[in-house]
Amino acid sequence: MLRPTKADFQALIRLALPLAAVQIGMMLMGVVDTAMVGRFSAAALAAVAVANVWYFAVTTVGMGCIAVLDPVISQAYGARDEVGIARGVQRGFVLALALTIPTTLGSLPVEPFLRFMDQPTEVVPLAGDYIRYVIPGIFPYFGFMVVREALQAQGIVRPLLVVIVGANVVNAAANWLLIFGNLGAPRLGVTGSALATTLSRWAMFLGIVAVTWRVLRPRLIPWHRETFSWPPFRRMLSLGLPMGLQILFEYGVFGGMGLLMGWVGTEAVAGHQIALNMAAVTFMVPFGIGAATSVLVGRAVGSDRPDEARRRAAAGLVVAASFMSLTALAFLLLPKVLAGAYTADPAVAAIAASLIPLAGAFQIFDGTQAVALGALRGIGDTRVPVLINLGGYYAIGLPIGLWLGFGGREWGPQGLWWGLVFGLAAVATVLV
């Protein structure tokens, strides 16, 4: 691997900082949801946690199919192919609309699934209510992803920041009103959190279209007849479906741990959700670095500069590992303080505080695997990472977690999380 230059680091940071900020902004909406629902009740927090396990599991394939726009548009941009960029954006919106239907249908059977997984009785109906009210936010979320991929591939990121800030304001205000019934609004609890999520997603989508219409208009008008040609869609799906499966496998092991926590009790689910939410927030930075790496590698490939692609992949790995080293230190030193920011329930806080240091243990692995995936995505390699994720998480991480949590050691929540540490370490090592 070639040594990255100062120019490579500068190009990466210019793009990665705003993209990471966008990812953090999107994640902050989940943080606000978790913190506010946690103040309502432990059962409400657990319901949102297990409902999101199912919801994100059924949306991951759609997310992967849309994320394929990253290499498609980046490589077209690197090759200065304006028509290729327009076709990519148009096909992205067609995919977003088409994927909304199966994603909606797949979201509905959440309650039978949770009962089958032996989740706490008081949590299951609340989780069902949550899913039903977030379903109307599926299309705007996919639509926002299409615009985001198109903009970041062209290096246009400031509008994304503006819209994310506005969506966070909408989400926080709607949560405050609808969860707790402030200012005369109905006190809806879990349902209020779901409605706030849906409202914020519509605000994200409509906001980004309005703010960037001058950029989007020439990509959407005129509409190219070739947009509906099946062979390009087939190629996009052949790249996107593996990406969706990779996300599903990765999210599935983390979400599956949440369901296994339900075997321990409601407090364990809530504590797990807090620690996982914190790890997810810090992960948004290397996720943004990985997205920037994917764009820069894709542009280099499109313009036939392979040495530049290698250098920028290396720069991404260095920056991500450095940042996650700092967050790992914070998680190891301040677990009780961080857990107390989420909940006033002593039992939930104690479990969260016991898991946060383990999140610190896998921070560097999590960051490096995100950037490695981004670099591979930039060159259009989406199939091999699926096998690496499947092996690392399900052949290594999950069995170790089950053995430490319920089998040979009976360490409970901490044992399950040690499985995550080993799984992430294996995946990151092989990907790099």
Image (cartoon, helix red, strand yellow):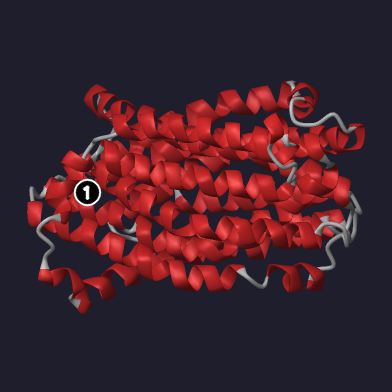
Looking at this view, is 157 or 96 the one in front? 96
Answer with left or right where residue 19 lies relative to residue 397: left
Identify which residue is drawn at 48% across, 73% down: 102
Task: Give the residue displayed 65% in from the left and 64% down from the top.
Answer: 394
In the shown orientation, is residue 34 left or right of residue 266?
left
Say which of 94 and 366 sits in front: 94
Q: Residue furthest front?
A: 184
Q: Quadrant of residue 164?
A: top left
Q: Where is residue 97 drawn, in percent x and y? A: 36, 66
Judging depth in this view, the residue of 413 and 41 nearest the camera is 41
Q: Position of residue 98 (x, y in %)?
A: 37, 70
* Residue type (three-letter) at the residue carrying disc 1: Ser
* Label 1 residue SS: helix
Number of other residues with Cα within 10 Å of mark 1, as a class: few under 14, some 14 to 19, many 20 or more: many
Q: Residue furthest bottom?
A: 230
- Is residue 69 in view? yes
Total marks in image: 1
Note whether 13 is above or below 297 in the view shown.
above
Horizontal and vertical percent position of residue 174: 60, 37
- Residue at (64% x, 37% y) in the render: 175
Image spot of residue 19 (x, y percent): 38, 34
Instruction: State the residue in front, 388 or 201.
Output: 201
User: Residue at label 1?
Assistant: 74
Question: Is residue 200 found left or right of 146 in the rendered image?
Answer: right
* Quadrant position of residue 156: top left
Residue located 65% across and 23% down the image: 329
From the viewer's perspective, is residue 310 above or below residue 89?
above
